Image (tube, coloured by chain):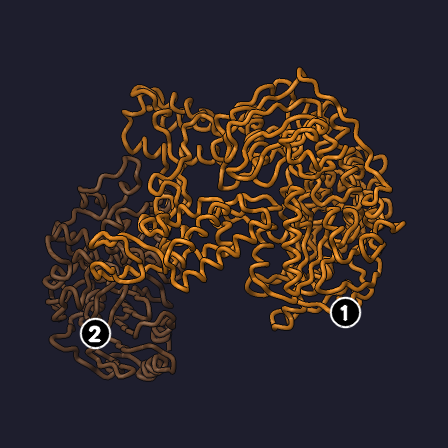
Chain colours: A orange, B brown
């Protein structure tokens, strides 16, 4: 049997383990958070597989394999689909480009498209002379159908489909409106006050329309400064506010491009049709609708063999996307706007489309974000990938997927130094029976999650009312969020959960609790991406006087640099450094607390404290090497001569939360938050783990721990987006305990969730659906878990536990 | 005027041995050899000093009188015509708004198109939306597809924040040609014939062939002029002579100076349709065209160097030829 054979793996917390991983099977790697399963799957199998392959094709010849294990054989080229690896930030990258469908669709238009002949007006194919009058071909290439190409984009909106424009009626409602009043209308008096007192003093209280054209224009739109920037101006300011969700005066319109109507391509491209529709229209339908259209095209139109082939390729891809629960998306949907799960499944679909075999796919919980109903479809997709001759390694928590695996490797028993061993290898029934397996004991029911006491919610209970919500696909939704409770928002992918909570509720709360444009707290992160939520204005939120504040705890990373880590984020790094600075050795050398940080002299000058050197191999390939100057010690030698209670500052960074909690006993500022982290199942986390290497789920729980440790005296609304990502049942239990604690202290916790365990333990559930995209957007059930179980309209109900 | 500047070609250029013009024949031969290397697309190499040809070499069966497409060197010729039009009063000043010349266009009051002047076009700092990939101006393709080029260009969005910032855009040059056409009442090629080509001794530049036109018949401003090395060298020599030719000022000297200096502190390498670069101690201004077309002018050395090539999408940069020639012994 072909297998990957690993001998004496010692990387991170793995305890010199040796094992065989069968090839061409679906293998689940299980264990609690921090057990070492990701190390095994990603840092060993994936990294070595990738490295060996690159070496064999001559791309990676200068670097030596750096430890980790004694020997590893049986590898093939490896591909990883992991959240950290595939994060996308370019809004021009969309479902159509990533799936490859746009490539084929544009070619389809090139070869089969029709447009009215400029000479005689009859509808004729664009790649042949006009059959009616003989007029020559326009000869359009595929770039002419691309909203991302200079050849095809609508020039007015540059292919984005939307524009920002000042609403002059609101800014200057009457001919007498002064500059000062206009600023009032736009809600920016404080920002531009300096101009009223200075340069624009003489126009401040006179009708703005009477000011000279250049003065008006310069203030409204700015003067180009020759370096690609504009002077301080109203348009830019409102636009920046709008993107952050803080513009509510209506003085800036974010509207559909008047030139292309949101189709994003040039007029010339819109003239070319397939069965009466142009590419812009096809790019805006859901993939499900597109599938139907293309099917009827195949039936009705006279296509050439090439056209039929192209159509076939597109339909194959659509089918794979459908099987992965992505039919509610559109081709134009940008990648940064997708949820973590959707993004991962999109990448997975592309891999399936590539039809390569003998690869090793290493996937990190590909079922993230999927409703139970959708997980089966994904599983069959993974089987397809396997049937092509590939090996599928799944780092998994989901009971159904673990049960479906051909082979299971359980790492543990617990996390960090209490993990790193192979607890069990074999089939599912064996796992359930394995005595030492934490995973097995939860799956088999031997261990149970402590059931939470569910609070009955009375109809008259205090609540927040969110109404008139029309964001994205939501259809005038109204929901009541009972306060002092654990509330869950459920629904299939694309049903509108994120639109309701993250894109409507959160920005509305942000406005409510904002003072002078700043967020209520640093963690209330509204994603400042290029695409603002479309049209959440109009939605109303009532009852906010009953809460003190809110905190949206997302999965966005806690930092983008290697020098950001849990210690810096949780603000215990400064107190720790102070302790070191107070030691006798530090005093003797004259080290201030700043010297122990990464920004100042104490850090290794070569790697600035990251301990690594990143080497560019060409193309998109990078490799990390240990910093040659400090050998990974991150600090200069003299800094490491200072000890606090026998440990150096580097030792502290390498300590896990559990170890640090014991070490810093007595230092309340430090242990308070460590205690919360330990309780939420993150005791295994090293204090100095670089922020970019943390999973979204880990980042979220760190933020949550930080919030809790700040000791807000109840009456806060916490909002969490799929907090159980990356958690085993064991860890989920710990998280639930934490959330319950918040509720018992008088706060409200709102979770957007798929996990039936979490949902079953909520006091109140709001379910959106029934489907995704235009088939969703409505509240289909509201009530306690028990009520949803009895509710025939609820899709989630049947999956909830009694 | 110094002796050196009083020599101008008549019907034909005079040739002279390099050493009589204080040039090193070995260096010239070495440069000529570099252009002859296998894989080189060079077609013609010409060096003029003090009004005479010091070196001439042709490659790959080219004849010394063959005309080549100059591509963007055309822009530098266009620039001289703008200077002439200013002198003649057809244009009032470089700060004239572009829209003055297109009264049929009525943009919104807030449209930044209203802010553009001739200077912005000349300096390639118009902010016109014109994406490129390296040297390749993708938008040219789209321009070619449009039925009315000038209308297409005027319809391009102007990115307000980019006005004043250097961004090479052949559309801007074409707009200048359209403007010249309107104010002169003639085809730019005809306008150039009377004022430039005829006095320079460049004959038979036929509109539509030797200088291409757009679908509306407007002479191309950004490319499209075909001349031989000997012919374009005359234009270069005119510039090295400060716009004077045989005792006449064909182009105002002030314009020659203004257009061959940085258009703004932010763009030290570009004037008004001329590229600028110091080589050693000397200031060089050049017309450059894709595929290997070069017109180097070094007034301080009374030198003109022409390199014309058969168009190739990958070509060797030839500034090193001038650098070699100007290097101290």
Q: At 28% from the left edge and 49% from the top edge, which residue is drawn?
A: B120
Q: Is residue A571 above or below residue A167?
A: below
Q: Which circle, 2 or 1, is nearer the viewer? A: 1
**Residue on which disc 2 sits:** B67
Mark 2–mark 1 contact, CB under 8 Å? no
Residue sitting farthest toward the top:
A460
The image shows residue A564 at horizontal and vertical percentages of 67, 46
- Same chain, labels 2 and 1: no
Q: Position of residue A476 (x, y in %)?
A: 51, 27
Question: What number is the disc on residue B254?
Answer: none
Given residues A555 and B285, the one toward you in this image is A555
Q: Is residue A759 left or right of residue A256?
A: right
Number of numbered discs visible in the structure rendering: 2
| Badge 1 element | loop
In which quadrant will I find the C terminus of chain A?
Answer: top right
Identify the residue at horizontal 72%, vertical 35% (top origin): A800
Within the image, what quadrant is residue A618 found in? bottom right
Front in this rendered view, residue A759 or B127: A759
Q: Quarter of the image containing the N terminus of chain A? A: bottom right
Of residues A799 and A92, the one drawn nearer to the viewer in this rendering: A799
- Of helix, strand and loop, which one carries label 2? loop
- Name the chain letter of the residue that bears numbered label 1: A
Quick one: label 2, few (<14), some, or many (20+) residues within 10 Å? some
Residue B122 shows in this picture: no
Write down the residue under mark 1: A1
Where's residue A760, x and y in %?
73, 33
Of all chains, the one bearing label 2 is B
Point out residue B43 in the picture as x, y percentages from the top left corner. Answer: 28, 78
In the picture as drawn, the residue positioned furthest to the right comes out as A435
Gap between marks 2 and 1, in whole Å? 72 Å
What crowding class fits label 1: few (fewer than 14 Cα within 10 Å), some (14-19), or many (20 or more)? Answer: few
Q: Is residue B2 above or below residue A489?
A: below
């Amino acid at each position: 049997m072909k297998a990957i054979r690993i001998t004496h793996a010692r990387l991170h917390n793995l305890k010199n383990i040796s094992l065989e991983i069968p090839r061409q099977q679906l293998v689940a790697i299980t264990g609690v958070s921090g057990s070492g399963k990701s190390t095994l799957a990603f840092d060993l199998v994936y990294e070595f597989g990738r490295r060996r392959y690159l070496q064999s094709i001559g791309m990676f010849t200068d670097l030596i394999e750096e430890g980790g294990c004694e020997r590893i054989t049986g590898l093939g080229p490896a591909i990883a689909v992991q959240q950290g690896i595939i994060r996308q930030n370019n809004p021009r990258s969309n479902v159509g480009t990533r799936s490859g469908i746009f490539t084929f669709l544009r070619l389809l238009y090139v070869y089969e498209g029709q447009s009215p002949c400029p000479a005689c007006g009859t509808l004729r194919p664009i790649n042949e002379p006009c059959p009616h009058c003989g007029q020559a071909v326009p000869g359009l290439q595929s770039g002419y159908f691309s909203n991302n190409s200079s050849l095809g984009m609508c020039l007015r909106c540059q292919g984005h489909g939307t524009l920002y424009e000042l609403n002059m009626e609101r800014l200057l409602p009457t001919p007498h409106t002064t500059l000062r009043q206009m600023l009032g209308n736009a809600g920016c008096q404080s920002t531009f006050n300096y101009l009223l007192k200075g340069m624009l003093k003489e126009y401040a209280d006179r009708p703005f329309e009477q000011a000279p054209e250049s003065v008006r224009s310069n203030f409204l739109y700015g003067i180009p400064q020759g370096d690609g920037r504009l002077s301080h101006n109203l348009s830019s300011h409102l636009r920046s506010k709008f993107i952050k969700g803080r513009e509510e005066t209506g003085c800036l319109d974010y509207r559909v491009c008047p030139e292309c109507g949101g189709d994003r391509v040039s007029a010339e491209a819109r003239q070319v049709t397939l069965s009466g529709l142009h590419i812009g229209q096809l790019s805006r339908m859901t993939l499900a609708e597109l599938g139907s259209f293309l099917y009827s095209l195949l039936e009705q139109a006279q296509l050439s063999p090439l056209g039929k082939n192209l159509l076939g390729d597109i339909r194959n891809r659509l089918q794979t996307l459908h099987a992965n629960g992505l039919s509610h998306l559109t081709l134009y949907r940008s990648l940064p706007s997708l949820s973590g799960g959707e993004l991962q499944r999109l990448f997975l679909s592309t891999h399936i489309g590539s039809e390569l075999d003998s690869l090793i796919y290493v996937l990190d919980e590909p079922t993230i974000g999927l409703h139970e109903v959708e997980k089966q479809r994904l599983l069959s997709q993974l089987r397809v990938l396997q049937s092509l001759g590939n090996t599928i390694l799944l780092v998994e928590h989901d009971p159904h997927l673990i049960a479906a695996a051909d082979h299971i490797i359980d790492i543990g028993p617990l996390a960090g130094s209490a993990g790193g061993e192979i607890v069990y290898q074999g089939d599912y029934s064996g796992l359930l029976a394995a005595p030492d397996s934490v995973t097995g004991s939860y799956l088999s029911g031997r261990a149970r999650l402590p059931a939470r006491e569910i609070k009955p919610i009375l109809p008259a209970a205090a609540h927040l009312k969110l109404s008139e919500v029309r964001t994205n696909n939501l259809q005038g939704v109204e929901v009541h969020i009972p306060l002092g409770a654990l509330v869950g928002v459920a629904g299939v992918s694309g049903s509108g959960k994120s639109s309701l909570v993250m894109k409507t509720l959160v920005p509305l709360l942000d406005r409510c609790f904002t003072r002078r444009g700043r967020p209520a707290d640093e963690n209330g992160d509204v994603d400042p991406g290029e695409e603002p939520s479309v049209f959440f204005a109009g939605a109303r939120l009532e009852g906010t006087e009953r809460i003190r504040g809110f905190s949206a705890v997302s999965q966005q990373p806690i930092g983008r640099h290697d020098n950001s880590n849990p210690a810096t984020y949780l603000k215990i790094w400064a107190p720790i450094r102070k302790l070191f600075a107070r030691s006798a050795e530090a005093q003797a050398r004259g080290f201030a607390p700043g010297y122990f940080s990464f920004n100042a002299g104490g850090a290794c000058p070569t790697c600035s404290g990251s301990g690594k050197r990143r080497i560019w191999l060409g193309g998109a390939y990078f490799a990390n090497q240990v910093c040659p100057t400090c050998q990974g010690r991150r600090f200069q030698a003299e800094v490491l001569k200072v000890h606090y209670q026998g440990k150096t500052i580097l030792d502290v960074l390498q300590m896990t939360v559990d170890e640090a909690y014991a070490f810093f006993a007595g230092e309340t500022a430090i242990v308070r938050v460590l205690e919360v982290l330990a309780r939420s199942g993150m005791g295994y986390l090293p204090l100095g783990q670089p922020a970019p290497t943390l999973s979204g789920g880990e980042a979220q729980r760190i933020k949550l721990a930080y919030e809790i440790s700040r000791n807000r005296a109840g009456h806060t609304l916490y909002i969490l987006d799929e907090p159980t990502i990356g958690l085993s049942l064991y860890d989920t239990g710990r998280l639930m305990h934490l959330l319950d604690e918040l509720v018992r202290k008088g706060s409200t916790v709102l979770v957007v969730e798929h996990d039936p365990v979490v949902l079953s333990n909520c006091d109140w559930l709001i379910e959106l659906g029934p489907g995704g995209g235009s088939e969703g957007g409505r509240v289909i059930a509201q009530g306690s878990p028990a009520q949803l179980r009895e509710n025939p309209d609820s899709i989630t109900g049947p999956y909830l536990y009694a | 005027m110094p002796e050196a500047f009083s020599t101008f070609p008549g019907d034909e250029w005079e040739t002279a041995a390099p050493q009589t013009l204080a040039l090193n024949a070995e260096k010239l031969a070495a440069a000529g050899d570099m252009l002859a290397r296998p894989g080189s697309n060079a077609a013609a190499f010409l060096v003029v000093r003090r009004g005479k040809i010091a070196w001439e070499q042709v490659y790959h069966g080219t004849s010394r009188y063959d005309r080549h497409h100059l591509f963007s060197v055309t822009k530098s010729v266009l620039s001289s015509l703008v200077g002439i039009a200013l002198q003649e009063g057809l244009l009032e000043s470089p700060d004239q708004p572009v829209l003055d010349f297109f009264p049929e266009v009525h943009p919104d009051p807030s449209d930044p198109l209203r802010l553009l002047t001739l200077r912005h076009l000349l300096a390639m700092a118009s902010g016109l939306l014109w994406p490129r990939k390296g040297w390749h101006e993708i938008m040219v393709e789209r321009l070619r597809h449009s039925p009315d080029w000038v209308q297409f260009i005027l319809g391009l969005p102007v990115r307000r924040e980019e006005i004043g910032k250097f961004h090479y855009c052949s559309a801007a040059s074409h707009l200048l040609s359209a403007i010249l056409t309107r104010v002169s009442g003639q085809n730019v090629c005809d306008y150039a014939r009377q004022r430039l080509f005829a006095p320079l001794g460049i004959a038979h530049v036929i509109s539509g062939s030797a200088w291409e036109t757009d679908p509306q018949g407007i002479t191309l401003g950004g490319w499209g002029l075909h001349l031989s090395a000997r012919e374009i060298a005359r234009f270069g020599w005119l510039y090295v002579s400060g716009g004077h030719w045989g005792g006449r000022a064909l182009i105002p000297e002030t314009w020659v100076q203004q257009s061959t200096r940085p258009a703004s502190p932010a763009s030290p390498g570009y004037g008004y349709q001329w590229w600028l670069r110091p080589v050693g101690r000397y200031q060089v201004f050049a017309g450059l065209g894709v595929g290997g077309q070069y017109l180097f002018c070094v007034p301080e050395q009374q030198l003109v160097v022409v390199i014309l090539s058969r168009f190739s999408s990958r070509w060797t940069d030839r500034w090193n030829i001038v650098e070699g020639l100007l290097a101290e012994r």
